[in-house]
Image: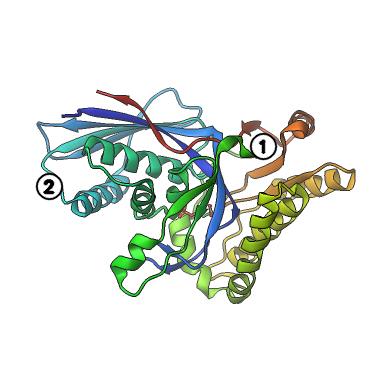
Amino acid sequence: MIQSVTVTSPANIAFIKYWGQKNDELVLPFHDSFSMNLSGCVSTVTIQRQQAIKDLTMQSKFYGQTEFSEANSAQLHKIKQFFDFVHQYLNIPSSHGYSITSENSFPHKAGIASSASFYAGLTLGLVTLLEAEISQAEMSMLARMSGSGSAARSIPDGFVWWHKGNGETPVELMKSSVAESIAAPNYWDIADLVVLLTQDQKKVGSQAGHKGAVSSAFFPDRLLSVDERLKTIRTAFDHKDFATFGKIMEEDTLSMHLVMMTQNPPLYFWSGKTLEVMKQVVNLREQGMHVYFSIDAGENVHVICQKADEAKIAAHFRQQPDVLNIIHNDPAPGARVTQLV
Ligand code: PMV
């Protein structure tokens, strides 16, 4: 019997984003989304069986910390519910406890998808520990059901498409919303430079934020226009047309943030520093550079460019007084088991 599993699992950046849930309980998005796994933003998650106790413990070491800290009861409760769901789904009784340790190579809860990398790692770790044989699509579905829907996109390799799913019954719907790789990491030499402006944790998590999306007067407009963006970006991706790809990606970020800022209560994730980086990206473009931004639920900015321009663009942002650090990311593989005991 496997006693312990370690998984490394990437965060991902969505080019077409997921915001709002059609069904909270089943973590179903209103539309498809499309992302890339990030080589420089990785969680390492270890799950160990505990024979003596039937409890769950978790210790985490976040970016910049030297010591592990214990998870609080709310975090443990969420994980426990998820573990119970996975056991139930796999039809394996949960007869003992688990101790979890997790480490992140990047700031936590700062708009860099730390919950996606963590929950994807947790899902692959638990399913491996339980020695259940399931497909990658099913693994992504389970990761989605953690509550952090975008964790589904951190399971497959490289460039990933998450399908919104369809079906008549709740079970059909639950099973049909899965993520799949549409290209390996080496398909396209693009880079994501995370321009780090803060390491502070955001006050409102994505899960609370998704619930408010439908209250925005701009949400119907986002839903009307997103399918066209998905279609156009897919064609641009297939043709490696970086200019169209970047333009659509930026439009989608702005569309999502318009919804966020106009939902009730409103969510303003940008700071003045965020806006400054966005403006500089536009300025660099006016000077002829091929560079675009993407922003998730946080203040930090993802600056996306072609690999050939990466060093020059990183050097530009490194000089800026507000920039704490630049995290370099190439397209990366999905979650994988690195150790089994
Ligand atoms: O998966 P969640 O619940 O952490 O939501 C992710 C939301 C965004 O990061 C803002 C967008 C996305 O598609 O990654």
Residue 272 place in picture, x, y as percent: 72, 50
- Which quarter of the figure has residue 174? bottom left
**Earlier sequence position, callout 1 versus callout 2:** 2
Foreground pick, 264 / 122: 122
Residue 186 place in picture, x, y as percent: 60, 34
What kind of residue is marked 2?
Answer: Pro
Task: Using a 10 Å C-alpha cutoff, classify the residue at mark 2 as few (fewer than 14 neighbours), some (14 to 19) or many (20 or more).
Answer: few
In the displayed structure image, the side of residue 254 where residue 51 appears, left or right: left
Element under label 1?
strand
Q: Is residue 140 above or below residue 68?
A: below
Q: Outermost residue, front direction?
A: 239
In the displayed structure image, the side of residue 272 where residue 340 appears, left or right: left
Residue 80 circle label: none
Q: Outermost residue, right direction?
A: 287
Residue 93 circle label: 2
- Which quarter of the figure has residue 252? bottom right
In the displayed structure image, the side of residue 110 where residue 74 appears, left or right: left
Residue 202 is at least partly visible in this image? yes
- The N terminus lies in which quarter of the figure? top left
